[in-house]
């Protein structure tokens, strides 16, 4: 009787899981593998790395960019698309978000963003990625072809993965595994808050304890690394084993930190162990932009719409950080550290133009710069012969709220369905108004 009840419970849970999955699955079918050449003609081509080319053609063959130039000849059997006057960009890249890991914030069963414990360097974000998320098509509709998703939590959070946004499952979606080990840096501020109204001395003590704990984790991981190199490890610790690539500087360390003190602490740790460091967040990065450039520390800036961090800062300080990093020579990309709001990243890049970036620099911040930070600049991020045919077409300037109108998107030469739940509801309730 007991076994029967257990089986019934298991089947009920399975049925519930399948029902939930069906409810949360969007109905856009992933594009088919490119079978014939496609020639796009008459475009303003924003190559990113080779300037803007007016009235140019682009040829796509077998999922790659085969040619870029004027008056290209269509191969036998090619599909020719006259897109005269439209703008062609590389498929945009969104870094450091949790797209596909969470569906509805208020429903815990749809949230796979966070793992328990403080030591999860062996956690891989791709395994929790839901390629059927209803949110993903809304992101694609604004021109995004790629997203680098990461697991959240505290301390050693886990590894990010770069995913392409038109897939049946996480295996199809995976572009690059282990693009970085993500760390939530311990708090450095001693100010209390409504949620933590402790005296400054207590906050300072707690901060020091957390920092000491993080440093100990790295000492333990380095000891494992040294033993592994010497052939002395007799067992496998999956946590520290996944950090071997970090100590070899083959896998970057992505430190989530906003405060200047946090960033300085992270730089010291990276220098101590010879790690390749990228700062995620970086609200205070403008305060030490020259130092970041000198140390070759990249920044994924996640507050392009941010409010001032301090009461005495300029109201527009968050908006001018990209220009400050650009002028200092810091390698940077723009991001919105969320999931549903990732679609607005393209407009955040446009806003940065209003605060000092050139259109070319803004485009780099969501294309080739992002590809470089993710370690895939040889494959995506610009319109060059041999790179992936991941391209987006807009009627006007893709960064302009008014001119922006994405009409076509290809990922690896596969045409992507740009329909989404938002558009469906829009069309539905237009009928109600009429």
Image (tube, helix red, strand yellow):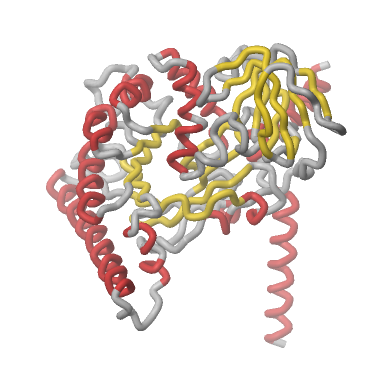
Residue 191 image point, x, y percent: 20, 39
Q: Tell which of 323 and 113 is nearer to you.
A: 323
- Is residue 431 in view from this perspective? yes
User: Please, is residue 122 above or below residue 69 in the view?
Assistant: below
Q: Quadrant of residue 214?
A: bottom left
Residue under the image location 87 percent in, 33 percent down: 77
Q: Quadrant of residue 391?
A: top right
Most extreme residue toward the left is 201
Residue under the image location 36 percent in, 33 percent down: 331
Residue under the image location 52 percent in, 19 percent down: 51
Number of callouts: 0
User: Please, is residue 319 above or below residue 113 in the view?
Assistant: above
Q: Tell which of 332 and 204 is nearer to you.
A: 332
Residue 25 image point, x, y percent: 72, 48
Most extreme residue toward the bottom is 1
Q: Tell which of 123 and 4 is nearer to you.
A: 123
Q: Quadrant of the C terminus?
A: top right
């Amino acid at each position: 009787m007991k076994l029967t009840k257990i089986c019934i419970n298991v089947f009920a849970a399975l049925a519930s899981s399948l029902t939930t999955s069906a409810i949360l699955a969007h109905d856009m079918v992933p594009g088919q593998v490119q079978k014939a050449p496609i020639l796009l003609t008459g475009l303003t081509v924003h190559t990113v790395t080779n300037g803007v080319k007016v009235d140019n053609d682009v040829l796509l063959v077998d999922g790659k960019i085969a040619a870029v130039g004027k008056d290209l000849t269509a191969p036998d059997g090619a599909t020719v698309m006259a897109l005269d006057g439209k703008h062609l960009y590389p498929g945009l890249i969104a870094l450091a978000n949790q797209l596909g890991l969470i569906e509805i914030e208020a429903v815990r069963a749809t949230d796979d963003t966070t793992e328990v414990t403080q030591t999860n360097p062996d956690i891989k974000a791709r395994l929790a990625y839901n390629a059927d998320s209803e949110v993903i098509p809304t992101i694609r509709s604004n021109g995004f072809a790629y997203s680098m998703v990461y697991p959240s939590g505290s301390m050693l959070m886990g590894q990010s993965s770069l995913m392409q946004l038109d897939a049946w499952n996480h295996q199809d979606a995976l572009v690059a595994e282990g693009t970085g080990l993500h760390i939530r840096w311990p708090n450095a501020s001693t100010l209390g808050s409504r949620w933590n109204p402790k005296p400054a001395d207590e906050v300072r003590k707690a901060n020091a304890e957390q920092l000491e704990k993080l440093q100990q984790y790295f000492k333990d991981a380095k000891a494992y690394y040294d033993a592994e190199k010497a052939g002395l490890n007799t067992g496998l610790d999956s946590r520290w084993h996944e950090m071997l690539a970090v100590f070899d500087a083959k896998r970057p360390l992505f430190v989530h930190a906003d405060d200047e003190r946090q960033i300085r602490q992270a730089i010291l740790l990276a220098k101590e162990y010879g790690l390749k460091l990228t700062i995620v967040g970086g609200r205070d990065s403008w305060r030490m932009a020259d130092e970041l450039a000198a140390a070759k520390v990249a920044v994924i800036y996640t507050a392009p719409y941010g409010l001032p961090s301090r009461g005495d800062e300029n109201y527009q300080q968050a908006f001018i950080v990209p220009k400050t990093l650009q002028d200092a020579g810091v390698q940077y990309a723009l991001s919105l550290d969320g999931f549903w709001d990732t679609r607005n990243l393209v407009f955040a890049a446009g806003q940065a133009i209003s605060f000092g970036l050139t259109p070319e620099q803004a485009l780099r911040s969501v294309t080739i710069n992002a590809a470089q930070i993710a370690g895939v600049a040889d494959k995506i991020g610009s319109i060059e012969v041999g790179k992936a045919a991941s391209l987006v077409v807009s009627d006007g300037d893709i960064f302009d709220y008014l001119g922006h109108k994405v009409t076509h998107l290809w990922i690896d030469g596969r045409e992507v369905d740009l329909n989404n739940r938002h558009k469906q509801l829009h069309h539905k309730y237009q009928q109600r108004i009429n």
